[in-house]
Image (cartoon, rainbow, N blue to C red):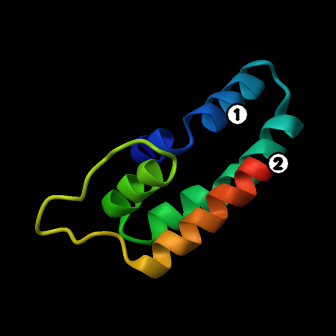
């Protein structure tokens, strides 16, 4: 999940802090909002997905090195939607 943590770092820090504070219901609720992004990353081409997630948020990440291909356009669209839903709250 380290790569995914680069895509949604603030959200994962919040989940960890809530767990540390023993606010488990809040942590679970936050995790359920973050998980669709992570699930998409781990069920598609992971490294290209992480790079696409960073790029979508304005963090230059470049393209993956061969033999990996860039993230497919349909997955980019799905990731964009998942990130938008997460940011909407």
> Dot 1: few (<14), some (14–19), or many (≥20) neighbours within 10 Å?
many
Give the answer, above or below, for where 12 lies relative to 49: above
| Mark 1 touches mark 2? (CB < 8 Å) | no
In the picture provided, is 80 more to the left or to the right than 62? right
Give the answer, above or below, for where 37 lies relative to 19: below
The foreground one among 81 and 9 is: 81
Q: Give how far across and how far down residue 16 sits, in percent.
A: 66, 28
The residue at the point 40 percent across, 45 percent down is: 3
Where disc 2 sits, the SS reads loop
Q: Please, which residue is most extreme toward the bottom here?
A: 74
Q: Please, which residue is most extreme toward the left here?
A: 66
How far apart marks 1 and 2 lie (CA) works out to 14 Å
Residue 1, numbered circle? none
- Total number of numbered discs in the rendering: 2
The foreground one among 23 and 88 is: 88
Q: Give how far across and how far down residue 48 sits, in percent.
A: 33, 62
Q: Please, which residue is most extreme toward the top here?
A: 21
The residue at the point 47 percent across, 44 percent down is: 58
Closest to the camera, between mark 1 and mark 2, is 2
Give the answer, above or below, for where 16 lies relative to 54: above
The foreground one among 41 and 74 is: 74
Q: Give how far across and how far down residue 54 sits, in percent.
A: 44, 48
Where disc 1 sits, the SS reads helix
Q: Give how far across and how far down residue 79 sits, in percent.
A: 55, 65
Indicate which disc, 1 or 2, sits on the residue closer to the N terminus: 1
Q: Which residue is mark 2?
A: 89
Residue 60 lies in what quarter of the image? top left
> Dot 2: few (<14), some (14–19), or many (≥20) neighbours within 10 Å?
few
Q: Which residue is mark 1?
A: 15
In the picture provided, is 3 more to the left or to the right than 7? left
In the picture provided, is 83 more to the left or to the right than 28? left
The residue at the point 66 percent across, 37 percent down is: 11
């Amino acid at each position: 999940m380290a790569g995914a943590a680069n895509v949604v770092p603030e959200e994962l820090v919040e989940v960890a802090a809530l767990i540390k504070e023993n606010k488990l219901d809040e942590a679970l609720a936050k995790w359920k909002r973050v998980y669709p992004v992570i699930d998409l990353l781990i069920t598609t081409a992971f490294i290209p997905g992480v790079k696409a997630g960073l790029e979508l948020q304005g963090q230059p990440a470049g393209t993956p090195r061969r033999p990996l291909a860039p993230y497919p356009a349909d997955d980019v669209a799905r990731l964009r939607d998942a990130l938008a839903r997460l940011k909407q709250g």
